[in-house]
Amino acid sequence: MKALVTVMPKTGVLDPQGKAIGHALAGLGFAGVGEVRAGKVIELELAETDPAKARAAAEEMARKLLANTVIESFSVSLA
Amino acid sequence: MKALVTVMPKTGVLDPQGKAIGHALAGLGFAGVGEVRAGKVIELELAETDPAKARAAAEEMARKLLANTVIESFSVSLA
Amino acid sequence: MKAAIILFPGINRERDMALALARVTGRKPQMLWHRDTALPAGLDLVVLPGGFSYGDYLRCGAMAAQSPIMQAVKAHAARGGHVLGVCNGFQMLTEAGLLPGALLRNASLRFLSMDCQMKVERADTAFTNRFQRGQVFRATMAHGDGNYFADDATLDRLEGEGLVALRYATPQGEVTAAANRNGSARSIAGVLSPNLRVLGLMPHPENQVDPLIDGTDGLPLFESLAENFAAA
Amino acid sequence: MTDTPALLDPARAKQLAAEFGLKPDEYDRVLAILGRTPSLTELGVFSVMWSEHCSYKSSRVWLRELPTKAPWVIQGPGENAGVIDIGEGLAAIFKMESHNHPSFIEPYQGAATGVGGILRDVFTMGARPIANLNALRFGTPDAPRMKRVIDGVVRGIGGYGNCVGVPTVGGEVNFHPAYNGNPLVNAMTVGIAPADRIFLSAAAGVGNPVVYVGSKTGRDGIHGATMASAEFSADSEEKRPTVQIGDPFAEKLLIEACLELMATDAIVAIQDMGAAGLTSSSVEMAGKGGVGIELVLDDVPQRETGMSAYEMMLSESQERMLMVLKPGREAVAEAIFTKWELDFAVIGHITDTGRITIRHKGALEADIPLAPLESEAPLYRRPTAETPKLPVLDAASVADPLGPEAALLKLVGSLDLCSRRWIWDQYDSMVGGQTAKRPGAADAAVVRIEDHSRALAMTTDCTPRYCLADPEAGGAQAVAEAWRNLTAVGAKPLAITDNMNFGNPEKPEIMGQFASAVRGMAAACTALDFPVVSGNVSLYNETEGRAILPTPAIGGVGVLEDVAQAVGLALAPGLDLVLIGET
Ligand SMILES: Nc1ncnc2c1ncn2[C@@H]1O[C@H](COP(=O)(O)OP(=O)(O)O)[C@@H](O)[C@H]1O
């Protein structure tokens, strides 16, 4: 089964990339764009078929490697 | 309303980052991890309140700036 | 001084670092492999060099920080051993939890390759005692992710405990926003562990150790280490 | 074992041949060589080997005029890169190569993979790369897409070079509307090897294993070599799926692994898989060695499922090499590549048949005699038209509307002369710890050789508007400028590499520019004892029928016996200024 780990900068952490994207969108003439945040998504193909176990495994991977919890928060979804 | 633009390498396009993450997860002892693909997610705070219009706007932003459609595909979801 | 440099896949300033260490000790440091699980006995200094370990994919230093040898490096640090992390090595130290904070993307979102000036905030450590406190020295910076970040409480603690080793400054020693090219919090270029034995910094003093190449501004850092471990 | 592959239907084959870029008479030669209709894989092999990019069919007759010899030349054109003796038992190995078309389609990846490709050409010969340079031509920044192209190309060059840890120490940039739809990205790598340990590509030893190393093969860049030989048109957008992605991390591992294996005596021959990947590397290695080669594609490391023989032979996936090993050395080699976390596979062996045979899933997919594939390759002496000479201007009759002060300001602020700092501030020019003169510091970059006091000086030069006005003088001037830039830092100029970027060679005026530029370069090289040891040709640089300026980019290399002699351009206070030469 597939797990999707989404990693976003924590609130309060500087997000230069998000800020730059916001600027660039305004420059392209897109109006009504407020805050922009840029994060990562990692798609994992897992052999595990039990959803609870797959989720637990993906969370473990996120804590150990995929996210740096000093600056990032993560969420896991299954597909 | 919030729009989430997820940008992934197109199928068939080499994803060096995903490849390296897959290696590292295996090195950490995580078993049963198949293909890993790494993408970006951009969270946009939009003034628009109509879901259809918000989606259309986010898609336009993705095509114009957020995704490099030569090598990446994108999807939009609203929250 | 018995020094060793750890080789991770993708690092690329290990030769520069070896040359700098050889210059002050007269012999090449040992090169260790990331898959090793133990350090040789009696090491004075472990160096995590610069480069792009694992291509800087995911986060700079994140995958290297999980290497088998990092357990041994942590144990070495816990025993009071000295560790120097430069650039990618600094990123590995934060990722491994040996130093606080994190290195974010440069504020300009561009790779920055240029000279910078650093002001020495502490001259009473094994890394810096050949400098004067407040002295400014020049070094190469070459990184895409050198924007030091920590939350305010952590930054206050670092400053309170005197663990900020180096700050970006003008050649005259003023700490200004313009001199802080990558956008680091409080212009921090280098951070120490509480026992002052682990140092991480973004710029590359190992590129300024030879008068024929680019001057010797960085040499005092290596001379400090050599002098500190002269007996060994 | 059947002895013919599955052949294409004759009508279909003819149509496909045209789609793959083979002219009707070229296709007739294919039929004559094979004595039958080709299989799909065979047609693919012929079309890439006979593309302009791989066969140099329009340029070869002219390139022969370039002087390529000197006592210090160890290897001239014809191998992956040129090799010169620089003293103290050392050789400098260098080459320049274009990645123009891919860089317009996807600027970051196009430029990045250009750097990756030229690095492989150099380390494949046994050298550790010590410096990268580049020569860039862009359109005017306000032209459509051009800002993105400029930004992407510069980032791509930096992104790849910085990551592999080879300092980018110099280059040049011009802007001109002629490049609006066809920018030029020429990348140069210089490496150092022991002069007696140069690795060549000629295969030998019947039965010897053919080994694939590096990254896996995907469907990237299929028909990239033929794309590089085609003009741009509005439907270039459709060719996008052929874009390749660079993985500089894999390249760094490949450099270290190859150099480690080269320190043993396991390698007979080695070649990188560049344009036309497995096809050109296997055909060239076997062809040069006068042997045959049999490939079994089942064992090719594959990134995607269900790849056909045709796709594997034409894939341009990056960061791959092909080697012929001595018998029994597979295990030694495999251990090294496994340590560096790279793929390793034995995918065939050397035969005595003089043919390339390709098998996949038990079926014969291609069986081509190698000698005629090379000897019958098309070679054109295309018609040339001389560039008309412009009238000589009388300096006294030229008005001076600005006055010297305003004119100076205008010059200093012009696109072609303004500071390039924003570019080199993104390139790591110091990694390696040997860069004595970095960008901006001198007329040529100077990099010392580790553990030696000697140093190399390097520069790239060309002034395309001179070449447009007078291709012969422009070609000579580019060589002379490279020579002067090397001399100016205190180096003895030794040799050059070149990158000939021109429009459609089927137009006589373009072929005329090419021939004249070569003539000028040859004259200057001869006069200066400054031979050409490697180079690259990029033709069909046109958009909707409009050609770029003729751009023969020159990469020059010289040696300094002691890096302490290197001279920069920073003026010290209190010195006199001396002007040499006639103004
Ligand atoms: N694309 C580039 N990459 C790296 N360095 C460059 C590039 N373009 C120009 N430079 C550097 O900028 C400086 C000035 O370039 P240029 O004006 O072309 O020099 P010159 O006219 O002296 O040959 C040189 O040191 C050159 O190496």
Image (cartoon, coloured by chain):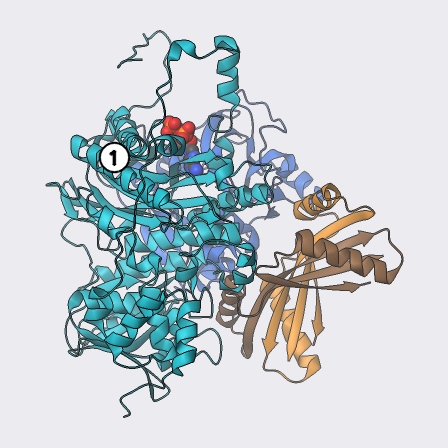
Chain colours: A orange, B brown, C blue, D cyan
Quadrant of residue D225 within the rendered picture: bottom left
**Could one spot residue D161 in this view of the protein?**
yes
Residue most extreme to the left = D71
Image quarter of the N terminus of chain A: bottom right
Residue at the (38%, 67%) spot, across then down: D342
**Could one spot residue D192 in this view of the protein?**
no
Mark 1 CB lies closer than 8 A to ligand 1: no
Q: Position of residue D408 (x, y in %)?
A: 48, 14
Q: Is residue D348 above or below residue C12?
A: below
Q: Secondary structure at mark 1?
A: helix
Q: Closer to the camera, D385 or D63?
A: D385
CA neighbours of label 1 inside 10 A, class few (<14), some (14 to 19), many (20+)? many
Q: Chain of mark 1?
A: D
Q: In the figure, is residue A18 to the left or right of C209?
A: right
Q: In the figure, is residue A72 to the left or right of C95?
A: right
Q: Closer to the camera, D402 or A34?
A: D402
Q: Is residue C226 above or below residue D571?
A: below
Rendered-image quarter of ligand 1: top left
Residue at the (56%, 42%) spot, across then down: D146
Q: Closer to the camera, D167 or A5?
A: D167
Q: In the figure, is residue D304 to the left or right of B45?
A: left
Amino acid type of the residue tagged 1 in the rendering: Gly
Residue most extreme to the bottom = D1
Residue at the (14%, 48%) spot, across then down: D74
Residue highlighted by disc 1: D520
Q: Position of residue D263 (x, y in %)?
A: 21, 59
Residue at the (20%, 67%) spot, across then down: D287
